[in-house]
């Protein structure tokens, strides 16, 4: 079919890479490499994050690229209108970038995100979906395929799969993980990696998105968005009701979502009602914590180690920026289940407020206990 490959006219459009993968798989690590390595191109970056307070933007390295954060809903279901607006805004300053990377939340179904580049006339006229790149955690994928529909969808839609953290599994386990991936998607290119050390020319500018394959997977992929209230509807600009949009500039303002039914409410993962095909695992919640005074590194290490050792099965992802007493550098903390890591990132700037912020994403999270534990780490 003629739709399987972009026409020559398509290559005059701005390429878009959708970067997806489950919580903690390594998406931000790969994004940081894209932003820092010398590949001769400038990327505009759109980050969508699961959590009431965004933190991924803090984890992305300082770069000259345009970085936009979307954290008041999931890109695949409730804020696709925001995605369209950001892309349209980007094209008003097209001379400042060569390509776009969209990093989805770890709980996103990439299907509706990809659909945006075909069913929205303004976007499809100027941008082409180059590829969907899915980062997979070799250690935790078997568990995710058992409890997460999103993890399977992310693999199913992938054109390129970065099979990451291969150093954390045995050769036999790696072979089994790859077999599981192939049982879901036998077409995607698979690249093994540790800390996402895949060559960037294997993931960028691949021209790999195959519309025919996606139509086999989702026959209704190119159909327009069903009307509001109908099955499969995606809340976007054309709904005709308020989705409480906010600015997405470098000030990255954060907005709390009013309760469902109240004015200004945004339909998101926390609503607790059906969002059609894009419904997520509603048992997964996020808790965000912040301290404005320095943290004792030894107290923090003891607390977080005990917490992850005892509750790590339910804590799918934790990450944060920490202001340790006695250090002039920001400490970046990251963990997936019980496996934690961290390093000093950069000096605190004289013009920025120092703080410590943690985000936990998981099931059965006890906000009060987490808050109390974090408070106990004050220096």
Image (cartoon, rainbow, N blue to C red):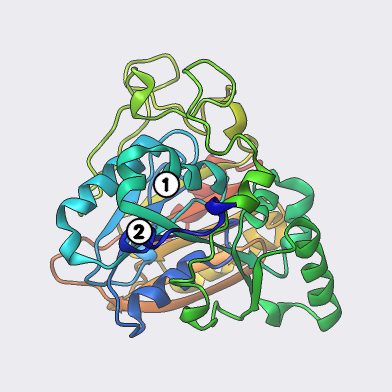
Q: Are marks 1 and 2 in contact (CB under 8 Å)?
A: no
Please determine whether, in this image, residue 61 is positioned above or below residue 278: below
Mark 2 surroundings: few (<14), some (14-19) or many (≥20) residues within 10 A: few
Give the structural element (helix, strand or loop) at label 2: helix
Please determine whether, in this image, residue 340 is positioned above or below residue 264: below
Give the structural element (helix, strand or loop) at label 1: helix
**Of 108 and 42, which appears nearest the observer?**
42
Mark 1 surroundings: few (<14), some (14-19) or many (≥20) residues within 10 A: many
Which quadrant holds the C terminus? Answer: bottom left
Q: In the shown orientation, is residue 272 left or right of residue 138?
A: left
User: Quarter-wise, where is residue 85 in the image?
Assistant: top left
**Of 52 and 6, which appears nearest the observer?**
6
**Is there any visible trace of residue 251 in the rendered image?**
no
Q: In the shown orientation, is residue 60 left or right of residue 210?
A: left
Total numbered badges shown on the rendered structure:
2
Q: How far apart are marks 1 and 2 (CA)?
A: 15 Å
Please determine whether, in this image, residue 21 is positioned above or below residue 191: above
User: Quarter-wise, where is residue 129 in the image?
Assistant: bottom left
x and y percentages locating residue 281 in the rendered image? 64, 38
Residue sitting at 26 percent across and 72 percent down? 63
**Is there any visible trace of residue 261 in the rendered image?**
yes
Determine which residue is flagged by label 2.
Answer: 9
Identity of the residue furthest to the front in this view: 2
Residue sitting at 46 percent across and 45 percent down? 51
Residue 117 marker: 1
x and y percentages locating residue 88 in the rendered image? 25, 45
**Which numbered disc, 1 or 2, marks the residue closer to the eye?**
2
Q: In the shown orientation, is residue 373 left or right of residue 92?
A: right
Which mark is first along the chain, 2 or 1? 2
x and y percentages locating residue 204 in the rendered image? 45, 72
């Amino acid at each position: 079919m003629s739709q399987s490959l972009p026409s020559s006219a398509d290559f005059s459009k701005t390429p878009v890479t959708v970067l997806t993968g489950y919580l903690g798989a390594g998406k931000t690590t790969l994004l940081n490499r894209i932003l820092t390595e010398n590949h001769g191109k400038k990327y505009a970056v759109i980050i969508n994050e699961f959590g009431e307070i965004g933190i991924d933007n803090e984890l992305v390295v300082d770069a000259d690229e345009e970085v936009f954060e979307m954290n008041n809903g999931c890109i695949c279901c409730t804020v696709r209108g925001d995605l369209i607006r950001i892309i349209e805004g980007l094209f008003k300053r097209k001379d400042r970038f060569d390509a776009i990377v969209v990093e989805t939340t770890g709980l996103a179904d990439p299907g509706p995100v990809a659909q945006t580049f075909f069913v929205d006339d303004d976007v499809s006229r100027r941008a082409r979906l180059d590829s969907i790149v899915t980062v997979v955690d070799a250690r935790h994928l078997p568990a995710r395929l058992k409890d997460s529909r999103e993890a399977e969808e992310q693999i199913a839609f992938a054109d390129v799969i970065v099979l990451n953290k291969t150093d954390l599994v045995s050769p036999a386990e790696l072979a089994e993980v790859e077999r599981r991936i192939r049982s879901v998607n036998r077409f995607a290119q698979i690249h093994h990696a540790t800390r996402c050390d895949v060559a960037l020319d294997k993931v960028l500018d691949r021209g790999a998105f195959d519309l025919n394959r996606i139509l086999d997977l989702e026959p209704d992929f190119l159909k327009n968005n069903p009307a509001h209230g109908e099955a499969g509807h995606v809340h976007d600009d054309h709904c005709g009701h308020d989705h409480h949009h906010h600015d997405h500039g470098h000030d990255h303002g954060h907005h709390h979502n009013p309760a469902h039914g109240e004015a200004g409410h945004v339909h998101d993962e926390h609503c607790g009602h059906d969002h059609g095909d894009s419904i997520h695992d509603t048992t997964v919640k996020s808790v965000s914590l912040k301290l404005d005074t320095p943290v004792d590194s030894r107290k923090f290490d003891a607390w977080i180690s005990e917490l992850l050792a005892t509750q790590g099965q339910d804590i799918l992802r934790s990450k944060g920026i920490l202001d340790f007493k006695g250090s002039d550098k920001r400490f970046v903390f990251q963990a997936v289940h019980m496996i934690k890591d961290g390093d000093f990132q950069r000096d605190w700037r004289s013009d920025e407020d120092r703080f410590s912020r943690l985000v936990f994403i998981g099931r059965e999270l006890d906000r009060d206990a987490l808050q109390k534990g974090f408070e106990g780490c004050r220096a």
